[in-house]
Structures are given as C-alpha cells and as structure tokens.
Image (tube, rainbow, N blue to C red):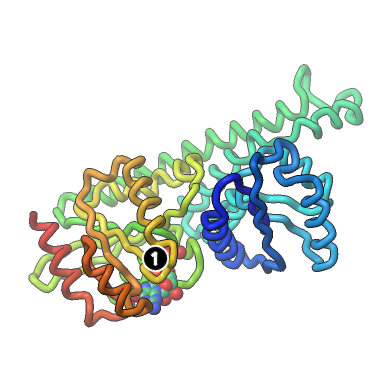
C-alpha cells in the first residue's frame, strides 16, 4: 500500500489504516505499507523516482505483485508507474469498486456497480493501445473512419445508456413497492453512517433479523427493510443501506442513486457512529457532509454512538455530553433510551 501526500502524516496514516481495512475486505494480503510526504506530487510518478525504485526492489523481495495507491491516480500516472515497476497498479477508488462488485447480490446492485465501473473505466481507456492498434491493425482492423478507441468508447457509452434504462425500470418497481407502504402510512427510519459502524447489527437487534453483519468494510450493499413495533404501540419500518466512506468519488455515489433514493422517504435518519474507531469524529463529518450534499439534512437526524461497550469510562463520559444516545447494538437490553428518543422525534 502506498500513500503519497502533501498533507500531514497523521491524516495520511489514518487514511492508510482505512486502506488496509479496504484491502482486507477485498481479500488482498498486505505485505508492506509506505507513506511518503512530499512538497509536491510528482506529475508522472507520484512519488520520487528514487522511492519508486526502492518500492520495486522491496516488492521483488517480498513477492508482491500489486501496488495500491491511497490517492486517486490519473490514467497516465497508472501507466508510468506500471511501466517503471512491472507491478499491477490500482488506486483506492478501484479497490472500492472491486469490493462493491463482490458484494452486490441484487439485480439492482449489480447494475449499479457495473455502471460505476464503466464510468470509471471510460476516461481511463488507453490512448496508447489505440496508437498501437493503428500501427499493427492494418487494413480492415477497424471500422470506417473509426479508431479502436472510439469503438470501445462508443460500446461502453451504449452499455451505460442501457444500464441506465434498466436501472430506471428497476427503480420504478421499487417506487411502486414503496408507494404501497406510503399508503399504509408507516413511517420509515433509515440507518445511515460510516461503513462498519454497526448499521446492520442494529437492524438485526431491533427487528430480530439476520442480515449479514460482519467486520468488513461495505459488508452491506443492497438495502434491506424490516418492520419494527415500538414499545408504545407504533409501527415503523427500519431500512439499512450502503455505508459511507471518505473521498467517495461522486460518480460512485451517483451510481447508488436509486439505493439512496430510499433515504428521501425516511421520517427519521439514524446516524450510527462507531465510537471505538479512533477516527470517529472525522467519520461523523464525512457522513454529515455527504448527507448535506444529498440534501438529506432537512430530515430529522438522531446521532447514535455505537460500540459504547468498547470504549473506556472517560471516553463514555465525553460521549454522554454530546448530542445523541450511546448504545451497544449487540445488546437489546440497552436500547430503550434510543427507542424512546427515536419515537419522540417521530412524533414531533
Ligand atoms: N463490540 C461491538 N461490536 C459491534 C457493535 N455493533 C456492531 N459491532 C460489530 O461491528 C462490525 C460491523 O458491523 P455491521 O453491522 O456489519 O456494520 P455496518 O454499519 O452494517 O457496515 P457496512 O454494511 O459494512 O457498511 C461487526 O463485526 C459487528 O459485530 C457494538 O455495539 N459493539
Ligand atoms: Mg451493513
């Protein structure tokens, strides 16, 4: 794992810890991590040439065959580094896309992720291959007046357009399903939050369900809804969705538009926060800023400080002074204050 930054080491280290988790979630075995602080990012090689050479030698020694950069790389940077190191090179976004591709189970999820992958690929189609095909392709190797690159681009654009149509159809079905719910006037509580915060665990405990909850980033991709009867005889629907993460590329977020659409009908958002994560304050900011971008900040939001069982007394005291409720999502007995507050907010 490689991180090159012009910012502080602390931030880079935080982000690197998360990249490590992402790699683990994608079944990548991490052999080494390197953080380099630079005054300027090298336009071609990202790192200095000397450092790049060092990385190559170290990879040979360790038997590594993949470099994952924590920063987003331009297509030409990927090419330069690949050429210089003979290693496969991907960036953080590509790693996230890979995890999403493994996790998507529903048809909608699969359509969404294919769309995001194609959109990611489109600007990265190599122009060099094109030059090569022009040299080696000879007569008849390409359509009239079209280079291979143009054909590839057009094919991908066609596919994207088709995916968009299919997604729209799936989205309509989902809309109808939801409108039945609306007619019955059952309020929806949506669980939102950083990935791995404990959203699915909370859904399971609240509704005695068995949605997959695991110590992996992006364990959940497809939304799930379950019924819940509140203590004071009020019925609600709780929905669980894909988690958020820092530096989520806009295109990726957009690909999940139809999944996220569910959130707009929520009467209450429950923001699940993993207080055992050292970076939780920054994670709160990431989630709240995404909620603002999605214009979801007009829906009432209850902050829930989860995994309270994992922090010490002092941290717990600090949390109790903040606005929100502390819970352990694994423990149904301690959820009453949370349920009361949620109900009060729904009634307001
Ligand atoms: N100790 C402790 N562990 C928890 C608590 N809540 C969740 N966990 C664990 O945290 C891990 C992540 O939980 P999930 O419910 O899968 O988290 P999520 O927010 O759904 O994550 P994604 O779907 O990956 O975005 C699991 O291993 C849970 O068992 C808690 O209150 N205390
Ligand atoms: Mg989940």
Q: What residue sits 16% from the left and 57% below the top?
A: 186
Residue 34 placement: quadrant? bottom right
Residue 29: x, y in percent?
Answer: 68, 68
Residue farthest top in this picture: 145
Secondary structure beneath dot 1 equals loop
Report if the beta carbon of the residue with label 1 is closer than 8 angstroms to ligand 1: yes
For the N terminus, the image quarter is: bottom right
Q: What residue sits 8% from the left and 57% below the top?
A: 347
Is residue 173 shown left or right of residue 20?
A: left
Q: Residues within 10 Å of mark 1 (few under 14, many from 20)?
A: many
Residue 314: x, y in percent?
Answer: 31, 76
Vertical position of residue 174 compared to residue 191: above or below? above
Residue 40: x, y in percent?
Answer: 65, 39
For the C terminus, the image quarter is: bottom left
Name the residue nearer the viewer: 306 or 141: 306
Q: What residue sits 80% from the left and 30% below the top?
A: 130
Q: Which residue is mark 1?
A: 197
Residue 68 placement: quadrant? bottom right
Is residue 176 shown left or right of residue 51?
A: left
Q: How many marks?
A: 1
Q: Is residue 105 visible?
A: yes
Residue 235: x, y in percent?
Answer: 15, 65
Q: What residue sits 50% from the left and 47% below the top?
A: 247
Is residue 230 shown left or right of residue 295?
A: left
Q: Is residue 206 visible?
A: no
Name the residue nearer the viewer: 44 or 113: 44
Name the residue nearer the viewer: 163 or 281: 281
């Amino acid at each position: 794992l490689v991180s090159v930054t012009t910012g502080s080491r602390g931030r880079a280290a935080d982000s690197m810890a998360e990249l490590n988790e992402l790699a683990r979630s994608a079944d990548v075995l991490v052999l080494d991590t390197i953080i380099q602080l630079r005054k300027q990012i090298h336009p071609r090689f990202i790192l200095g040439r000397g450092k790049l050479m060092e990385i190559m030698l170290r990879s040979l020694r360790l038997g590594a065959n993949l470099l994952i950069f924590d920063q987003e790389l331009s297509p030409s940077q990927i090419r330069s580094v690949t050429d210089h190191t003979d290693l496969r090179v991907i960036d953080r976004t590509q790693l996230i896309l890979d995890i999403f591709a493994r996790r998507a189970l529903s048809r909608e999820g699969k359509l969404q992720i294919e769309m995001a992958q194609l959109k990611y690929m489109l600007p990265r189609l190599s122009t060099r291959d094109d030059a090569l095909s022009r040299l080696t392709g000879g007569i008849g190797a390409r359509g009239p007046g079209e280079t291979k690159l143009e054909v590839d681009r057009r094919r991908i654009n066609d596919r994207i357009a088709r995916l968009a149509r299919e997604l729209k159809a799936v989205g309509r079905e989902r809309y109808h399903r939801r409108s039945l719910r609306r007619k019955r006037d059952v309020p929806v509580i949506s669980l939102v939050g950083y990935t791995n915060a404990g959203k699915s665990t909370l859904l399971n405990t609240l509704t005695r369900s068995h949605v997959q909850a695991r110590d992996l980033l992006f364990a959940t991709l497809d939304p799930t809804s379950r019924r819940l009867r509140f203590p004071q005889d009020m019925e609600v629907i709780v929905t669980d969705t894909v988690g958020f993460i820092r530096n989520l590329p806009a295109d990726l977020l957009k690909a999940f538009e139809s999944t996220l659409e569910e959130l707009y009908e929520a009467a209450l958002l429950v923001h699940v926060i993993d207080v055992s994560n050292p970076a939780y304050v920054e994670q709160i900011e990431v989630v709240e800023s995404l909620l603002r971008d999605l214009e979801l900040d007009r829906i009432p939001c209850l902050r829930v400080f989860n995994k309270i069982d994992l922090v010490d007394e002092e941290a717990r005291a600090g949390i109790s002074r903040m606005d929100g409720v502390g819970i352990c999502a694994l423990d149904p007995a301690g959820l009453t204050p949370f349920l009361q507050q949620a109900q009060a907010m729904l009634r307001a």
